[in-house]
Amino acid sequence: MHSLYLVTILGLALGMKAMIIEPRQATGITVDLGKTYQTMDGFGTSEAFQRALTMKRLSETEQRKFLDLMFSMDKGAGLSILRNGIGSSPDMSDDHMVSIQPRNPGGPNAEPKYVWDESDNGQLWVSTEAAHTYGVKTFYANAWSAPGYMKTNGNDANGGSLCGVSGASCSSGDWKQAFANYLVQYIKYYAAANVSITHLGFLNEPDYTTSYASMRSSGSQAADFIQVLRPTLDRNGLASVIINCCDTMGWTVMNSMLSQMGSTQSILGTVTGHSYTSSPTSQLSTKLKTWMTEGADNNGAWTSAWYSNGGAGEGMTWANNIYSAITGGNVSAYLYWIGGQDRSSNTNSKMIRVVNRQVDPSKRLWAMANWSRFVRPGAVRVGASGSGVRTTAFRNVDGMVSVQVINSGGERAVTITVGGGDFVATNATAWVTDNTRDCNPIAATVDATGKVSGSVPSRSMVTFVLRPASAAKV
């Protein structure tokens, strides 16, 4: 019995020793700069439907925290795209976005009667801050609907179509040109405030009828209006403004819209879709850039968790959603629905909520940060591969290479080797997001050959940032 006891203790000791010295799982990631994919335009969100107004009512301290969380490269997500809603409603009841021409001026050919309140449902404040304090350069102005008097149903809500497009005639006449002029005037108001609208959309979920601002359209009807809108922009010195279309409810719905547009695609700038009824896991049938312009967990109860059980609102879920959109859908931009709001809603429709008049970010925001802070506008996605993890890599315009690693398993030791060019890393940093950290620095090293080493904790996302000897080297 004594002998058996010794053998048992020895066996346990050896087993414990084996557990102690067993190395972490190791993953080698290879970045191939010679293999290139899409050029990125950025990552963003919206403060439409008076969400901006709710945030502007906070104290100045909390306003700044909110703006920092949205746009700061050091304190927040570093978002680089802001999507504004172009109002179509006659008033601001509930969360309606008021129109810049609330009343019918007397017909499509009458002198316009525009009204500008220098607020735009609070969006001008956010836009001005984004542009002038944080350096955001991409502003997407998107109309959910034309004003009701321009539509077949006489209401900016509940569907209806723009008067004058094919199959949509109205006794009041053809409103296509008047609506194009209306959109141009909106851009001019922002230009007067020194904010340049770079992208313009005239539809939002045209495949869906709802009780708030909405307008139905087929692909051929959208083409009818684009053929009026493009020359109107050009005549008004706005040739640089890119037309986006059509922000469909689901990603794959855009394929049917595109199939009806024919040659009009040649004057369309960017193809846009949402992720509600189908996700951007495959490429659309177009050679144009594609953006995923709205997605959210609009039904789940608020969670600020990175990972709990893989729920629809968790941060890690959204890190994976973005990964799939970039690698499978080939998107050049990814936008979450709402950035922040102070409204009585307990869902995950936003990335930042307000509790007791104080802003409270979720891990969805920090998932976005891993992409937006380190994949800047103009970055090109390059080849990246590694076993046991999901990984992407991008070469930024300043020469910096960022590598994103999503790890759904146990902790992994990672080495990163860059090939396919003359890039040699001389400096490396790493940033981690998990249940206890937002986007926090962790250790990364680089050896004499430029190979980078670091660790990716269990159920986390880590972004490695590699820089050559000269940041300007490309």
Image (cartoon, rainbow, N blue to C red):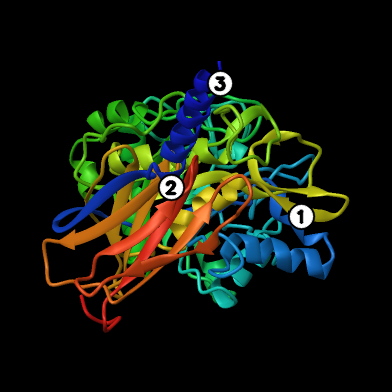
Mark 2: secondary structure:
strand
In the rendered structure, which disc, 1 or 3, sits on the residue that comes first in sequence? 3
Quadrant (top left, top right, bottom left, bottom right) of the N terminus: top right
Above or below, 76 against 361 in this view is below
Q: In front: mark 2 or mark 3?
A: 3
- Quarter of the rendering containing residue 224: top left
Above or below, 135 against 199 in this view is below
Q: Compare residues 457 and 293 and report the one nearer the observer.
A: 457
Mark 1 highlights which residue? Answer: 359
Q: Can residue 434 be seen in the rendering of this structure?
A: yes
Mark 3 highlights which residue? Answer: 2
Measured in 3D between alpha carbons, the distance from the residue under mark 1 to the one under mark 2, in whole angstroms, is: 23 Å
Q: In front: mark 1 or mark 2?
A: 1
Please state if 293 lies on the left or on the right of 269 as rendered.
Answer: right
Q: In front: mark 1 or mark 3?
A: 3
In the rendered structure, which disc, 1 or 2, sits on the residue that comes first in sequence? 2
Mark 2 highlights which residue? Answer: 334
Residue 73 screen position, x and y as percent: 53, 69
Residue 309 screen position, x and y as percent: 58, 27
Please state if 292 lies on the left or on the right of 73 as rendered.
Answer: left
Q: Compare residues 52 and 20 and report the one nearer the observer.
A: 20
Please state if 451 lies on the left or on the right of 314 as rendered.
Answer: left
Mark 3: secondary structure:
helix
Farthest top residue in view: 1
Residue count near mark 1 (Cα–Cα under 10 Å), binned few <14, some 14–19, many ≥20: many
